[in-house]
Image: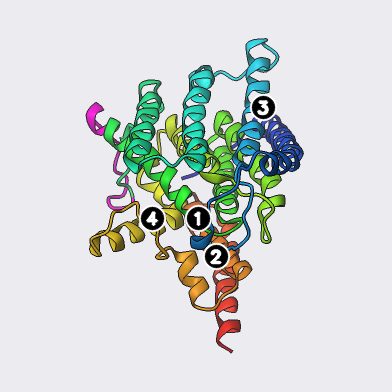
Amino acid sequence: MSMTLGSSFINFNLYSSLFCISLSTFISLFFNPILIKLGKKYNFFDSPSVREIKKNNNALVNIGGVSLFVGFFSVIFFIYLLFKSNFVGIYDDIFLTIPVISFACLIIFSTGFYDDKFPLSPFLRLVIQFSSASIMWVMGLRIEFLDLNFLIESYDLIELPRIISYFLTIIWIVGIINAINWLDGIDGLASGTSLLISLGMLIIGFYFQNSIAILFTSSIIGSCSGFLFYNLPPARIIMGDGGSNLLGFLLALTSIILFKENTNLAILPFSILIFLVPIFDMSKVILLRIKKGNSPFLPDKNHLHFQLLEKGFNEKEVLMIIFLLVCISLSVSLLFLDFKLFLPFLISSIVGILIIFLKKLF
Protein backbone atom coordinates (compact mmCIF):
# COMPACT_ATOMS: atom_id res chain seq x y z
CA MET A 1 0.00 0.00 0.00
CA SER A 2 1.43 3.37 -0.90
CA MET A 3 0.23 6.92 -0.97
CA THR A 4 1.72 10.16 -2.20
CA LEU A 5 1.28 13.02 0.24
CA GLY A 6 0.66 16.47 -1.18
CA SER A 7 3.17 19.03 0.03
CA SER A 8 0.43 21.59 0.74
CA PHE A 9 -1.42 19.05 2.88
CA ILE A 10 1.77 18.18 4.78
CA ASN A 11 2.67 21.83 5.40
CA PHE A 12 -0.80 22.91 6.58
CA ASN A 13 -1.36 19.91 8.83
CA LEU A 14 2.18 19.90 10.17
CA TYR A 15 1.79 23.49 11.35
CA SER A 16 -1.70 22.71 12.66
CA SER A 17 -0.38 19.68 14.53
CA LEU A 18 2.49 21.60 16.11
CA PHE A 19 0.08 24.37 17.11
CA CYS A 20 -2.35 21.90 18.73
CA ILE A 21 0.42 20.07 20.58
CA SER A 22 1.99 23.31 21.83
CA LEU A 23 -1.25 24.95 22.96
CA SER A 24 -2.72 21.87 24.66
CA THR A 25 0.61 21.19 26.40
CA PHE A 26 0.73 24.76 27.71
CA ILE A 27 -2.87 24.66 28.93
CA SER A 28 -2.37 21.31 30.65
CA LEU A 29 0.85 22.51 32.28
CA PHE A 30 -0.89 25.69 33.43
CA PHE A 31 -3.89 23.96 35.01
CA ASN A 32 -2.20 21.14 36.93
CA PRO A 33 -0.60 23.27 39.69
CA ILE A 34 -3.98 24.97 40.18
CA LEU A 35 -5.73 21.59 40.36
CA ILE A 36 -3.21 20.32 42.94
CA LYS A 37 -3.98 23.31 45.19
CA LEU A 38 -7.74 22.99 44.69
CA GLY A 39 -7.63 19.25 45.30
CA LYS A 40 -5.81 19.69 48.59
CA LYS A 41 -8.13 22.49 49.66
CA TYR A 42 -11.37 20.62 48.88
CA ASN A 43 -10.13 17.11 49.74
CA PHE A 44 -10.09 15.57 46.26
CA PHE A 45 -7.80 12.66 47.10
CA ASP A 46 -7.79 9.07 45.91
CA SER A 47 -9.12 6.57 48.43
CA PRO A 48 -6.69 4.45 50.53
CA SER A 49 -7.98 1.25 48.88
CA VAL A 50 -7.01 2.60 45.47
CA ARG A 51 -3.53 3.57 46.69
CA GLU A 52 -3.11 0.07 48.15
CA ILE A 53 -3.76 -1.43 44.73
CA LYS A 54 -1.55 1.17 43.04
CA LYS A 55 1.50 0.51 45.21
CA ASN A 56 1.74 4.13 46.32
CA ASN A 57 1.23 4.98 49.99
CA ASN A 58 0.89 8.72 49.47
CA ALA A 59 -2.59 10.15 49.00
CA LEU A 60 -2.61 12.14 45.77
CA VAL A 61 -4.97 14.69 44.29
CA ASN A 62 -7.10 12.76 41.79
CA ILE A 63 -8.62 15.50 39.62
CA GLY A 64 -5.82 15.72 37.05
CA GLY A 65 -8.31 14.59 34.41
CA VAL A 66 -9.65 18.17 34.42
CA SER A 67 -6.40 19.37 32.83
CA LEU A 68 -6.72 16.68 30.14
CA PHE A 69 -10.30 17.72 29.41
CA VAL A 70 -9.55 21.46 29.33
CA GLY A 71 -6.30 21.00 27.42
CA PHE A 72 -7.95 18.94 24.70
CA PHE A 73 -11.21 20.82 24.25
CA SER A 74 -9.74 24.30 24.53
CA VAL A 75 -7.77 23.57 21.38
CA ILE A 76 -10.55 21.70 19.58
CA PHE A 77 -13.11 24.43 20.29
CA PHE A 78 -10.68 27.15 19.27
CA ILE A 79 -10.21 25.49 15.89
CA TYR A 80 -13.95 24.78 15.69
CA LEU A 81 -14.67 28.51 16.15
CA LEU A 82 -12.14 29.32 13.43
CA PHE A 83 -13.91 26.78 11.22
CA LYS A 84 -17.34 28.31 11.92
CA SER A 85 -15.90 31.75 11.18
CA ASN A 86 -14.46 30.49 7.87
CA PHE A 87 -10.89 31.20 8.98
CA VAL A 88 -9.88 27.59 8.37
CA GLY A 89 -11.19 25.30 5.67
CA ILE A 90 -11.76 21.83 7.11
CA TYR A 91 -14.30 20.10 4.92
CA ASP A 92 -15.35 17.09 6.94
CA ASP A 93 -18.79 16.16 8.25
CA ILE A 94 -17.20 14.85 11.44
CA PHE A 95 -16.07 18.36 12.38
CA LEU A 96 -19.72 19.43 12.44
CA THR A 97 -20.36 16.91 15.23
CA ILE A 98 -17.80 18.51 17.59
CA PRO A 99 -20.52 19.85 19.96
CA VAL A 100 -22.09 16.38 20.25
CA ILE A 101 -18.69 14.72 20.72
CA SER A 102 -17.94 17.28 23.45
CA PHE A 103 -21.24 16.51 25.17
CA ALA A 104 -20.57 12.76 25.12
CA CYS A 105 -17.03 13.33 26.44
CA LEU A 106 -18.43 15.50 29.21
CA ILE A 107 -20.79 12.67 30.22
CA ILE A 108 -17.94 10.14 30.26
CA PHE A 109 -15.62 12.46 32.16
CA SER A 110 -18.26 13.56 34.68
CA THR A 111 -19.21 9.96 35.42
CA GLY A 112 -15.60 9.07 36.23
CA PHE A 113 -15.11 12.31 38.17
CA TYR A 114 -18.20 11.60 40.29
CA ASP A 115 -17.16 7.95 40.73
CA ASP A 116 -13.83 9.06 42.22
CA LYS A 117 -15.69 10.88 45.02
CA PHE A 118 -18.84 8.77 45.35
CA PRO A 119 -18.28 5.25 43.98
CA LEU A 120 -20.82 4.08 41.40
CA SER A 121 -21.75 0.50 40.59
CA PRO A 122 -19.90 -1.07 37.63
CA PHE A 123 -23.28 -1.74 36.00
CA LEU A 124 -24.28 1.94 36.07
CA ARG A 125 -20.88 2.99 34.69
CA LEU A 126 -21.27 0.51 31.83
CA VAL A 127 -24.78 1.75 31.04
CA ILE A 128 -23.49 5.32 30.78
CA GLN A 129 -20.53 4.23 28.65
CA PHE A 130 -22.70 2.17 26.27
CA SER A 131 -25.18 5.07 26.02
CA SER A 132 -22.41 7.53 25.12
CA ALA A 133 -20.99 5.09 22.58
CA SER A 134 -24.48 4.70 21.09
CA ILE A 135 -24.73 8.47 20.64
CA MET A 136 -21.49 8.39 18.68
CA TRP A 137 -22.80 5.58 16.45
CA VAL A 138 -25.97 7.57 15.73
CA MET A 139 -23.82 10.59 14.83
CA GLY A 140 -21.97 8.52 12.22
CA LEU A 141 -18.82 7.61 14.17
CA ARG A 142 -19.11 3.89 13.61
CA ILE A 143 -17.23 0.79 12.51
CA GLU A 144 -18.72 -0.02 9.11
CA PHE A 145 -16.15 -2.29 7.48
CA LEU A 146 -14.09 -5.33 8.33
CA ASP A 147 -10.70 -5.95 6.72
CA LEU A 148 -9.59 -9.55 6.06
CA ASN A 149 -6.65 -8.69 3.81
CA PHE A 150 -4.27 -10.16 6.35
CA LEU A 151 -5.95 -13.55 5.76
CA ILE A 152 -6.89 -13.31 2.09
CA GLU A 153 -4.73 -11.07 -0.08
CA SER A 154 -6.53 -8.51 -2.28
CA TYR A 155 -9.81 -9.17 -0.48
CA ASP A 156 -12.22 -6.23 -0.56
CA LEU A 157 -13.39 -4.61 2.65
CA ILE A 158 -16.50 -6.29 4.04
CA GLU A 159 -19.37 -3.88 4.69
CA LEU A 160 -21.06 -4.75 7.94
CA PRO A 161 -24.84 -4.91 8.48
CA ARG A 162 -26.05 -1.99 10.59
CA ILE A 163 -26.82 -4.12 13.65
CA ILE A 164 -23.34 -5.69 13.63
CA SER A 165 -21.81 -2.26 12.99
CA TYR A 166 -23.65 -0.94 16.05
CA PHE A 167 -22.58 -3.72 18.40
CA LEU A 168 -18.96 -3.72 17.19
CA THR A 169 -18.77 0.06 17.57
CA ILE A 170 -20.10 0.24 21.12
CA ILE A 171 -18.04 -2.78 22.23
CA TRP A 172 -14.92 -1.21 20.73
CA ILE A 173 -15.49 2.18 22.38
CA VAL A 174 -16.45 0.78 25.80
CA GLY A 175 -13.62 -1.75 25.61
CA ILE A 176 -10.97 0.91 24.97
CA ILE A 177 -12.41 3.15 27.72
CA ASN A 178 -11.95 0.38 30.28
CA ALA A 179 -8.64 -0.84 28.85
CA ILE A 180 -7.10 2.61 29.38
CA ASN A 181 -8.82 3.02 32.75
CA TRP A 182 -7.39 -0.28 34.00
CA LEU A 183 -3.90 0.75 32.89
CA ASP A 184 -4.00 3.59 35.40
CA GLY A 185 -2.36 1.42 38.07
CA ILE A 186 1.00 3.13 38.49
CA ASP A 187 2.01 6.75 38.03
CA GLY A 188 2.43 7.84 34.43
CA LEU A 189 1.32 4.58 32.82
CA ALA A 190 -2.11 5.47 31.40
CA SER A 191 -1.09 8.97 30.28
CA GLY A 192 2.21 7.78 28.79
CA THR A 193 0.58 4.89 26.95
CA SER A 194 -2.14 7.20 25.63
CA LEU A 195 0.49 9.64 24.41
CA LEU A 196 2.38 6.90 22.53
CA ILE A 197 -0.78 5.48 20.96
CA SER A 198 -1.81 8.99 19.91
CA LEU A 199 1.62 9.54 18.38
CA GLY A 200 1.22 6.34 16.35
CA MET A 201 -2.23 7.41 15.16
CA LEU A 202 -0.87 10.87 14.34
CA ILE A 203 1.67 9.32 11.96
CA ILE A 204 -1.10 7.22 10.38
CA GLY A 205 -3.28 10.35 10.17
CA PHE A 206 -0.64 12.05 8.01
CA TYR A 207 -0.37 8.87 5.94
CA PHE A 208 -4.14 8.79 5.35
CA GLN A 209 -4.31 12.61 4.91
CA ASN A 210 -6.94 12.77 7.64
CA SER A 211 -7.01 16.32 9.03
CA ILE A 212 -9.52 15.64 11.82
CA ALA A 213 -7.53 12.68 13.13
CA ILE A 214 -4.39 14.85 13.08
CA LEU A 215 -6.11 17.57 15.13
CA PHE A 216 -7.49 15.06 17.65
CA THR A 217 -4.28 13.09 18.11
CA SER A 218 -2.17 16.25 18.36
CA SER A 219 -4.45 17.66 21.08
CA ILE A 220 -4.33 14.39 23.02
CA ILE A 221 -0.53 14.31 22.74
CA GLY A 222 -0.24 17.85 24.08
CA SER A 223 -2.70 17.33 26.94
CA CYS A 224 -0.92 14.13 28.01
CA SER A 225 2.51 15.76 27.71
CA GLY A 226 1.54 18.59 30.05
CA PHE A 227 -0.07 16.18 32.49
CA LEU A 228 2.88 13.74 32.45
CA PHE A 229 5.15 16.48 33.77
CA TYR A 230 3.26 16.18 37.07
CA ASN A 231 2.26 12.50 36.79
CA LEU A 232 5.52 10.64 36.20
CA PRO A 233 6.99 8.99 39.33
CA PRO A 234 6.99 10.42 41.90
CA ALA A 235 3.59 11.79 40.89
CA ARG A 236 2.15 14.99 42.30
CA ILE A 237 -1.31 14.42 40.82
CA ILE A 238 -3.24 11.57 39.17
CA MET A 239 -5.92 11.72 36.51
CA GLY A 240 -8.57 9.73 38.36
CA ASP A 241 -11.30 7.74 36.64
CA GLY A 242 -12.56 10.92 35.00
CA GLY A 243 -9.28 11.40 33.17
CA SER A 244 -8.65 7.75 32.25
CA ASN A 245 -12.23 7.29 31.00
CA LEU A 246 -11.94 10.48 28.95
CA LEU A 247 -8.65 9.38 27.38
CA GLY A 248 -10.06 5.95 26.52
CA PHE A 249 -13.15 7.50 24.95
CA LEU A 250 -11.12 10.02 22.92
CA LEU A 251 -8.65 7.38 21.72
CA ALA A 252 -11.48 5.04 20.67
CA LEU A 253 -13.27 7.83 18.77
CA THR A 254 -10.04 8.99 17.15
CA SER A 255 -9.29 5.46 15.93
CA ILE A 256 -12.73 5.35 14.28
CA ILE A 257 -12.24 8.81 12.73
CA LEU A 258 -8.80 7.75 11.50
CA PHE A 259 -10.17 4.97 9.30
CA LYS A 260 -13.60 6.41 8.49
CA GLU A 261 -12.88 7.66 4.98
CA ASN A 262 -10.21 5.11 4.11
CA THR A 263 -11.15 2.69 1.32
CA ASN A 264 -8.07 0.47 1.56
CA LEU A 265 -7.92 -0.42 5.25
CA ALA A 266 -10.60 -0.83 7.93
CA ILE A 267 -10.30 -0.10 11.65
CA LEU A 268 -10.69 -3.78 12.56
CA PRO A 269 -8.66 -5.81 13.03
CA PHE A 270 -5.82 -3.36 12.23
CA SER A 271 -6.44 -1.10 15.26
CA ILE A 272 -6.11 -4.05 17.61
CA LEU A 273 -2.38 -3.83 16.83
CA ILE A 274 -2.33 -0.16 17.81
CA PHE A 275 -4.07 -0.87 21.13
CA LEU A 276 -2.57 -4.34 21.61
CA VAL A 277 -0.97 -3.76 25.03
CA PRO A 278 -4.02 -2.31 26.85
CA ILE A 279 -6.37 -4.77 25.10
CA PHE A 280 -4.17 -7.75 26.02
CA ASP A 281 -3.87 -6.60 29.63
CA MET A 282 -7.62 -6.06 30.02
CA SER A 283 -8.53 -9.35 28.33
CA LYS A 284 -6.07 -11.35 30.44
CA VAL A 285 -7.32 -9.81 33.68
CA ILE A 286 -11.00 -10.42 32.82
CA LEU A 287 -10.34 -14.07 31.96
CA LEU A 288 -8.39 -14.65 35.18
CA ARG A 289 -11.11 -13.04 37.28
CA ILE A 290 -13.86 -15.09 35.65
CA LYS A 291 -11.76 -18.25 36.01
CA LYS A 292 -11.52 -17.60 39.77
CA GLY A 293 -15.26 -16.99 39.97
CA ASN A 294 -14.84 -13.27 40.68
CA SER A 295 -16.54 -10.29 39.10
CA PRO A 296 -14.70 -8.99 35.99
CA PHE A 297 -14.72 -5.58 37.70
CA LEU A 298 -13.17 -6.69 41.01
CA PRO A 299 -9.83 -4.84 41.46
CA ASP A 300 -6.83 -7.13 41.80
CA LYS A 301 -3.11 -7.33 41.02
CA ASN A 302 -3.27 -9.47 37.88
CA HIS A 303 -2.41 -6.53 35.64
CA LEU A 304 0.91 -6.63 33.81
CA HIS A 305 2.32 -3.66 35.72
CA PHE A 306 1.58 -5.25 39.10
CA GLN A 307 3.07 -8.57 38.04
CA LEU A 308 6.26 -6.84 36.88
CA LEU A 309 6.47 -4.99 40.20
CA GLU A 310 6.13 -8.30 42.04
CA LYS A 311 9.00 -9.68 39.92
CA GLY A 312 11.27 -7.06 41.46
CA PHE A 313 11.25 -4.34 38.80
CA ASN A 314 10.93 -0.80 40.14
CA GLU A 315 8.21 1.57 38.98
CA LYS A 316 10.36 3.37 36.40
CA GLU A 317 11.54 0.05 34.92
CA VAL A 318 7.94 -1.16 34.66
CA LEU A 319 6.98 2.03 32.85
CA MET A 320 9.87 1.63 30.43
CA ILE A 321 9.04 -2.02 29.71
CA ILE A 322 5.37 -1.31 29.00
CA PHE A 323 6.15 1.81 26.95
CA LEU A 324 8.57 -0.25 24.85
CA LEU A 325 5.90 -2.93 24.39
CA VAL A 326 3.53 -0.22 23.13
CA CYS A 327 6.28 1.01 20.78
CA ILE A 328 6.67 -2.54 19.45
CA SER A 329 2.94 -2.89 18.70
CA LEU A 330 2.89 0.55 17.06
CA SER A 331 5.99 -0.26 14.99
CA VAL A 332 4.40 -3.49 13.74
CA SER A 333 1.22 -1.62 12.76
CA LEU A 334 3.24 1.02 10.90
CA LEU A 335 5.28 -1.66 9.13
CA PHE A 336 1.97 -2.97 7.77
CA LEU A 337 1.66 0.42 6.06
CA ASP A 338 5.10 0.03 4.48
CA PHE A 339 6.81 2.41 6.90
CA LYS A 340 10.20 0.70 6.59
CA LEU A 341 11.69 3.49 8.70
CA PHE A 342 10.10 1.89 11.77
CA LEU A 343 11.92 -1.44 11.44
CA PRO A 344 14.97 -0.08 13.35
CA PHE A 345 12.53 1.42 15.88
CA LEU A 346 10.93 -2.02 16.34
CA ILE A 347 14.30 -3.71 16.77
CA SER A 348 15.57 -1.07 19.21
CA SER A 349 12.39 -1.42 21.32
CA ILE A 350 12.86 -5.18 21.54
CA VAL A 351 16.53 -4.72 22.43
CA GLY A 352 15.55 -2.18 25.09
CA ILE A 353 13.24 -4.65 26.82
CA LEU A 354 15.89 -7.37 26.66
CA ILE A 355 18.45 -5.05 28.24
CA ILE A 356 16.09 -4.24 31.14
CA PHE A 357 15.40 -7.93 31.79
CA LEU A 358 19.06 -8.96 31.47
CA LYS A 359 20.06 -6.15 33.83
CA LYS A 360 17.57 -7.52 36.38
CA LEU A 361 18.86 -11.10 35.94
CA PHE A 362 22.55 -10.30 36.19
Which of the pair 301/281 is nearer the observer? 301
Please state the extent of the stretch shown in magenta in the rendering: 150-164
Give the residue at mark 4: 282
Horizontal and vertical percent for residue 127? Answer: 33, 33
Secondary structure category for the residue under label 4? helix
Which is more foreground, mark 1 or mark 4? 1
Judging by the rendered image, the residue that carries numbered circle 3 is 74
Which mark is first along the chain, 4 or 1? 1
Residues at circles 2 and 3 in contact by the CB criterion of under 8 Å = no
Residue 229 vertical placement versus 53 (above, below): above
Give the mark, 2 or 1, whose residue is nearer the N terminus.
1
Q: Is residue 271 magenta?
A: no
User: Where does the C terminus fall, quadrant-wise?
Assistant: bottom right
Q: How much space separates mark 1 and mark 3, taking CA atoms?
A: 30 Å
The amino acid on which the numbered mark 1 sits, given as a three-letter code, is Val
Inspect this view and state whether residue 45 appears.
Answer: yes
Which of disc 3 and disc 2 is earlier in sequence? 2
Residue 206 percent across, percent down from the top left: 59, 38
Q: What is the CA distance from the residue labelled 2 to the residue labelled 3?
A: 33 Å
Query: Looking at the image, which residue sits at the far top?
Result: 85
Considering every residue shown, the one lying at the far bottom of the view is 362
Instruction: Look at the picture and state if 342 lies above or below 122.
Output: below
* Cα–Cα span, label 1 and label 4: 18 Å
- Give the mark, 3 or 4, whose residue is nearer the N terminus: 3
Mark nearer the viewer, 1 or 3: 1
Q: The residue under label 2 is which amino acid type?
A: Lys
The residue under label 2 is: 55
Disc 2/disc 4 C-alpha distance (Å): 19 Å
Hey, what amino acid is under mark 3?
Ser
What distance separates the C-alpha of mark 2 from that of mark 1? 9 Å
